[in-house]
Image: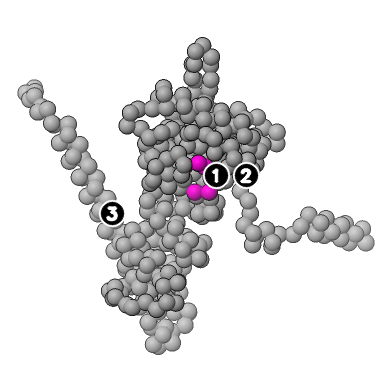
Amino acid sequence: MPEIVPLPPDYAALLTDIRQRVRQAQTRAVMAVNGELIRLYWEIGALIAERQKQEGWGAGVIPCLARDLHNELPEEKGFSERNIKRMLAFYRTYPHLGQVPQPVAQTEAMEKVPQPVALFPPELLLSLPWGHHAELMAKVKEPATRQWYMLAAVQFGWSRNVLVMQIESAAHHRQGRATNNFAARLPPPESDMAQQTLKDPYIFDFLTLAEGFHERELETGLVAELEKFLLELGQGFAFVGRQYHLDLGGDDFYIDLLFYHLKLRCFVVIDLKRGAFKPEYAGKMNFYCNVVDDRLRHASDAPTIGLILCQLPNRVLAEYALRGMDKPIGVSTFELTRALPADLQSSLPSIEAIERALAGDTEAEGA
């Protein structure tokens, strides 16, 4: 039987330190491999583009190239015709990736338009997996918007599927849009961080609720789909409880949903409301935040934040109601179905057009 050796007092700290270093080294190794793969694909795209420019190669060369690479390197994946076309597009989208940065005197016109090297520095491009780049090139054409999703994907560790979902729900339009009083109730930079944490609207299209649902049904559905709910709330939210009980002088009160935000280091109280915002909702939320600050908040925690989620927006009422509150509170809306993009909406036939077409089909069958 091995002899039991007493461990030194700082052994646990040593173990934690080594474990963290191992994980950091593993992350760096993965990132290094990913960066090399991105560079390789960019170089292949550059080679093809150069041949097309100098020797007039047409698009028909790419299918042949994909077939021959498969025959020559059968064990290597990622060289399909479609992916090689992506490599060419990647090079043309980010031609600066292989260039050594040179100090260039900017003209007035250049200063007004963000340059690719400023929007997409090499370290950002090399930090994203290839699948993310493929989705971004296909789905996000505006450079500044694409940069927003790149930075968010790196910061929050979005998978490819999560990135696609965020793009399809237009997350860049919703982030930081909630009506709030954070600037007056929180010091900078905490107020800015809190504002960017909240969205408007929140999209709960993973729920199936019939028209005329009750608030408790909405609450139950969100908790039942907690993983998707947390994903829509955003990075950093940790679930504490539903219908969180507060006993005050013999009276019972219940918070709809209580969270703790790991980055803001504060509790977040969420109140769910059907219909439009009403001024009295702010007073109730202010009350809840006071109680949570008094009963649950630790000395090192930041002030509790309240989030009122309503079905219909009324920014004017919300702004007036929040002015008299001494707690940081935000007001956002929620939607149970994802709105169609404007360009897709315009391409769909109207109800009247569908009815006319159906009527025409009926007449034709009768004839």
Q: Amino acid at mark 1?
A: Thr
Q: Earlier in the sequence, mark 3 or mark 2?
A: 3
Residue ID for mark 1? 179
Which image quarter: residue 316?
A: top right
How crowded is the residue under tag 3: few (<14 C-alpha within 10 Å), some, or many (20+)? few
Q: Is residue 231 above or below residue 60?
A: above
Q: Position of residue 26 (x, y in %)?
A: 24, 49
Residue span colored magenta: 176-182
Of the pair 25 and 83, the residue shown nearer to us: 25
3D distance between C-alphas at marks 3 and 2: 49 Å
Q: Mark 3 vs mark 2: give the one in front.
A: 2
How crowded is the residue under tag 2: few (<14 C-alpha within 10 Å), some, or many (20+)? few
Say if residue 202 shows up in the picture: no
3D distance between C-alphas at marks 1 and 2: 9 Å
Q: Mark 1 vs mark 2: give the one in front.
A: 2
Which image quarter: residue 40?
A: bottom left
Q: Amino acid at mark 3?
A: Val
Residue ID for mark 2? 316
Q: Amino acid at mark 2?
A: Val
Say if residue 181 shows up in the picture: yes
Of the pair 132 and 62, the residue shown nearer to us: 132
Q: Is residue 171 above or below residue 243?
A: below
Name the residue rendered at 21%, 40% in the picture. 19
| Label 3 with label 2: CB-CB less than 8 Å | no
Q: Earlier in the sequence, mark 1 or mark 3?
A: 3
Q: Which mark is residue 30?
A: 3
